[in-house]
Image (cartoon, coloured by chain):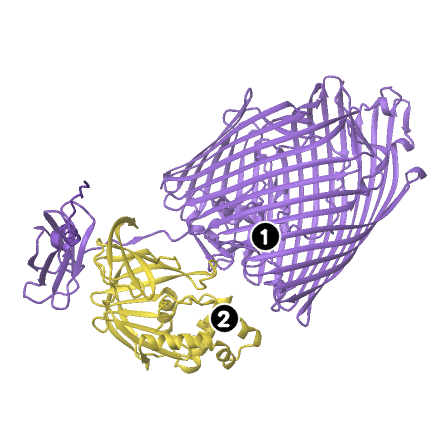
Amino acid sequence: MKTYFFYFLMFIAECSFAQLFGHKYIEIEPAKMVITYSYKFQSDSTDASSVGSTKMLLFLGDDVSKFVSRAVYINDTASRKFTSNEQVFQYQNSPETPRSGVTFQILKNYPRDKITFIQHIPSETYRFEEKLNQFDWEIRNDTVTIGGFKAQKAVCEFGGREWIAWFSPELPYNDGPYKFYGLPGLILRIHDSRNFFDFEMLSVNKLSPHLMIDIRDKDYIVTTKQGFFKAEDSFREDIISRASGAGMSNESQQKAAKNMAKRNNPIELKRK
Amino acid sequence: MVIEPFRYPKSRLILLFLCLLMLFHPALLGQVIIQGQIADPSGNAIPRINILLYEKVSDVVLAYAISDEEGRFTVKLNSGTDSLRIKVSSVNYNDVVRIISNQSQSLKYTLTEEIKDIEGVTVMASPIQKWGDTLSYLVQSFTRPEDRSIEDVLKRMPGIAVESSGQILYQGMPINRFYVEGLDLMEGRYSVVSKNLPKTAVTAVEILENHQPLRMLEGKVESRQAALNLKIKRGVTTTGTALLGTGFKPFLRDVNLTPMIFTKEFQFLTSFQTNNTGNNISRQMEVYTQEDIGSYDERPNGKVEFLNVIPENPEEISTDRYLNNNDYLLNINGLKQIGKNLNLRSNVFYTSGNQQSTTNVLRSFYIPDDTLQFTEQFDNKLFAGLLFANFSISRNVRKNYLQNDLKIQRAWGTQSGYVFSENTNVLQSLTNPFKNISNECRLYYPIGKHIWEFHSLVFFDQNQHSLKAEPGQFGEELNNGETYDHALQEIDVRRLHIANSAGLFFNAGHWNFSPKLGVIYRQQILESSLFIREINGESFLGPEASNHVTTCGTQSYLLTDIEYKTEKLKLKGTFSLSAQKADLSEENPENVQSLTKLLHSNRVSLDYRIHSFWRILAYWENKLRLNDVEESYSGYILNNFRSLSKNVVPLSTKKMQRFYSRIEHRNQITSLFNTLIYVYSINQSNNTINNLVNDDDGSFVSTNISSPAFSKTHFSQVYSSKYMSFMKTTLSLRASLALKQGQSLVNGKVIKTINRIISIDPKISIHLTPWMNLDYSVGYNEIMTFIGKENKNQIRLTKYNINFFWFPAKNQLISLTADSYSRSAKSDFFVDVLYRYTITRHKIDLEIKCTNIFNSETYTSYLSNDFSVWESTIIVRPFQTLLSFRFNF
């Protein structure tokens, strides 16, 4: 229930400022493979029972890849068919609509050698770029088998956390979940040393016919990574007044604020 | 003369050290730099190509590079080997593998386009997910092709156990609610759902930990128990099972029509079942949910059972092994949500059953210098009919809570049978009908930030029972030592129980404070008379063997809960102060008694979550109450042909102390669940049963004397289960140790008794191959009885149970069940075979089942008491064949 309220809030904020249907998209290139990952995350670092989990999809094209949550992907695909506001509302209110708190989209090598990160923070959609080859991987000798693929260990430091990755040269992609990139094989599993965040491959599937990797053509707030973190942090702190603006009752506001306080464990710790 | 040892000057030492260091420095060992360029045949640079360096024969990557936009790469490595293997690999170009020497060099590779076919794979999804306090078990991960109902799948889920009765436990504790799509249609009688809901209708089984059923109290009053919720597949509303079966010998029938409708606003289940194959259907109508321990004792005791025709059936094996029955069940349940929050529910059922059994009983009594043993054979017939109706209205929302339940029950029952023993053959017949009606209302509503609570229960029942024993027993006590024709015991017990209470719930930060005031009034009228009949007429035995007792108990109490809670820790103290008054009036003025006492009970409990996986629960309780005045009667009652009792108890207090602790560990990521329970309890009263065992026939006269009685019990239990998803295998272990120390008064002697029961039951359910599955369990039981310090009896039982499933084709199943129960001298062995053919298109099963193919005749079970052990050998059902036809609604 807690998290539902949050999605609702995100949604309210989105629909009160944005156009609901008939969006335009820029097609980039066809995706030939899709990798499904399970993503477990502990949103409150002080409470080990605050573990959430969701499914993530990594679409791989020849040059570009896109990483989104399964829920975002499904909702995005569904929303393209809508022609009226009623349809949008009906879809959003349906209990069958998948929901996930993980709402970011990550495009890699788009533009060339860059990571594009897109996320909506009420009431704007932010977009920033960072370097694609920013990971200083160190290869280790340990090997395991994941889903029938032989994988080797590699470690790196990123965003203030120590990450342990398992990549498989049998799948000669340089990609992986989240922003992770640059190993000579697909990352099948990656988690931080404290096990707060854990991405694990669930399936590898060919896409035929190929699907388009695209990006919504809209007025993004283009910022830097630090600028985005600032917006994210201030949203977290500012939640009560925003909730009140969206017409939430007092109890819900407090609850939202409390829930936000519990979301104290971002995947990237280095905020400045 | 002092000779100075030779010394290198310091500077030289440092130099030497540096030289040594440099010798071993990898850079000096030779860092190899391999550079290169990758292009296609027309000379265009190819970016994002992987260059991997390995030792000549190894799969471990030593170093790597990825070609840049100009197709260039640089790999640096330090390796002692002479040669290296280089692999150039990518998705859209051909692979190149070469052996190169381990020295710096520049390479050039030309790649041609080649689309690689990467096989798709799916790794099994994590079978158990956790969201807050909810654990969600994916049914698909645990299901096997041989399963039919959801109960079959539940048995294999780690952390969940299904008892042979059908009761569901989570971490060793009974669940407190059973929901389907969040609604409680059956109110605890869930077995009819779990046994008849097809597994294919369910997507997930959710365990709601610490489930507080009252929405209003969510987050305020935490429950320690878990509830179970079944998530029905999208698009499924009507479901259920239909089964028609027939067989021989004798003529067998098995019919089960159980359609169900589950939606979020309306639920309906009706069931018609009948069989004579040993399936005791009335068990599906038992309430298996249990309310949180610690709720104050406001309810009347269960059934009135002064009279009985022994013995009881064994619990540990399935009834279809031994029960000769003829059962019917008709059950109709409906739940409708009116408006948004009001639920109307009605549950009505009728069960009727005839049962027949033949049991040999060896009773052993251990007394200090002797062991008395008696053998008897019972041929019993039983008929039981029960009509039950419950009408309920409830509103369970955040703002308030209301629930009213009206229950009406009417039962008809007769039991009769012969008992053959060395001395006499006795015919017993018992009729035990009862009627009962109760209404219970619970109301919670808020006042500002606080909550009011009201509770009211009115309960009335009437039990008119009679027992006839022929020829008459206890001539010594009842007929001046003469034998007589028959004895007739008549008894009528009427009970009224009214409980009302009102409470408040305050919350201030970390503190909860909830005082509750209540009054309980209990009245019981017990009338009994024992007649003896001789050829020349019937005679009434007079006050010595008749009772007319009216007992009244009044209890006014103040119960206060004080709780301190943080996210991880909950400390709670429950203190109750009650004025208890008991009155007992009888015709005989000597036995009229009255006692008023002010008594207190306390309980302190702790609930600590050490970590998301670990939790400790513990409480200590000290209860003082008046002894059960309802069990007091001064005239003899013939309980059964060999037990005569009277129970004149001076009213006094009894004391119960209990320490309960429980450590839970649950890791849903590794699918490992463990619970360790330890309970220590002490009971003290001023009321000892004086048992007089007759050496000749083992008959029993029990009376009560006023003398301190004391017993201590230690009980510990372990539940462990683990699911290994890569093998699709569930491992589980249940082990317990019970130690009871007490004293008994037998034939005028006080004896110290110790009963020790050990049981260890490991179980494995393996998915061997896609066409072969195996369930295997072993059980070890040991019952020991010590009298004084002497070990009088030791029974060791070992049981093996194998269930083997083989699928010769996708739609065919052959299963073999072998059960063996052995004790040093005796052994019981049963084998069943089943063949199932599934018409996949119509989802119809055709089954042939042969049970007990080796025609084993008996099954032996053991029951131990303070100073006695009963060994019962029951005649089992013979070899039989059943043909059946099953489909889902």
Please tell me whether residue B178 is drawn above or below residue B836 in the rendered image: below
Identity of the residue furthest to the front in this view: B1
Residue B101: horizontal and vertical position, in percent?
7, 50
Q: Label 1 amino acid?
A: Gln
Q: CA distance from mark 1 to mark 2?
A: 26 Å
A29 horizontally vs B75: left or right: right
Name the foreground residue: A208 vs A184.
A184
Task: Provide the chain ID for the residue under circle 2.
Answer: A
> Which colour denotes chain B?
purple
A156 horizontally vs B480: left or right: left
Task: Find residue B575 and report its image quarter.
Answer: bottom right
Q: Label 2 amino acid?
A: Phe
Task: Provide the chain ID for the residue under circle 1.
Answer: B
Residue B273: horizontal and vertical position, in percent?
60, 44
Q: Secondary structure at mark 2?
A: helix
Q: Is residue B791 visible?
A: yes
Q: Please give the residue where the numbered disc 2 appears in the rendered image.
A: A5
Q: Please give the residue where the numbered disc 1 appears in the rendered image.
A: B225
Task: Find residue A15 and report its image quarter.
Answer: bottom left
Please tell me whether residue A24 is drawn above or below residue B622 in the rendered image: below
Q: Is residue A148 visible?
A: no
Q: Residues within 10 Å of mark 1 (few under 14, many from 20)?
A: many
> Which colour denotes chain A?
yellow
Q: Secondary structure at mark 1?
A: loop
Residue B635: horizontal and vertical position, in percent?
87, 33
Please tell me whether residue B704 is drawn above or below residue B576 in the rendered image: above
